[in-house]
Amino acid sequence: MRPADSFYFFCFLLLVSGATQASPGQEPAEPARATAIATLLELQRSGKLASAHRQALPGPAQSRAWQRYIDSFATPIPARYIDDSFKAK
């Protein structure tokens, strides 16, 4: 992993771990967090942090993943979900 990759990966881990959240009684740093997320998403989109090594699944795993993808089209997307809340019960 290149040094820049390590830096951005560390920043990503801080974001998802919640380490950037404000302490009690302190204003949340939402603008800074939004900027960091936007930067990470742009890096992902641009491919600047992409690995130089091709990452592929072994043959049998790749075949199973492809078959699951193809099978997912067998079930139509419902026009309406039974439960609209999507909240844990």
Image (cartoon, grey):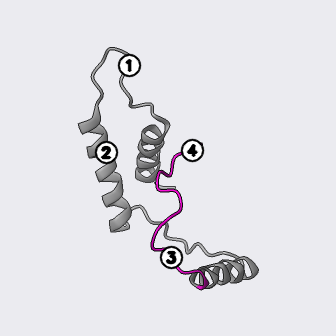
Write the residue at 55% across / 75% down: 54
Quarter occupied by residue 74 = bottom right
Q: Which mark is residue 36?
A: 2
Mark 3 → mark 2, Cα distance in angstroms: 34 Å
Mark 1 → mark 4, Cα distance in angstroms: 27 Å
Q: Amino acid at mark 4?
A: Ala
Q: Which mark is residue 23?
A: 1
Residue of label 3? 77
**Front disc: 1 or 4:** 4
Quarter occupied by residue 56 = bottom right
Q: Is residue 85 magenta?
A: yes
Write the residue at 41% across / 42% down: 11
In the picture, measured across the screen, residue 4 lies left or right of residue 72, that is left
Q: What are the residue bounds of the magenta stretch?
A: 74-89
Q: Is residue 61 magenta?
A: no
Residue of label 4? 88
Q: Amino acid at mark 3?
A: Ile
Q: SS of the residue at dot 4?
A: loop
Q: Which residue is outermost to the right?
A: 60
Point out residue 16 in the picture as x, y percentages from the top left corner. 47, 42
Mark 1 → mark 3, Cα distance in angstroms: 43 Å
Are the residues flagged by discs 1 and 2 in contact, CB closer than 8 Å? no
* Number of marks: 4
**Which mark is first along the chain, 4 or 2?**
2
Density class for disc 2 (Cα within 10 Å; few <14, some 14-19, many ≥20) is some
Q: Amino acid at mark 1?
A: Ser
**Front disc: 3 or 2:** 3
Q: Amino acid at mark 2?
A: Ala
In the picture, measured across the screen, residue 18 lies left or right of residue 55, that is left
**Front disc: 1 or 2:** 1
Q: SS of the residue at dot 3?
A: loop
Point out residue 46 in the picture as x, y percentages from the top left corner. 33, 67
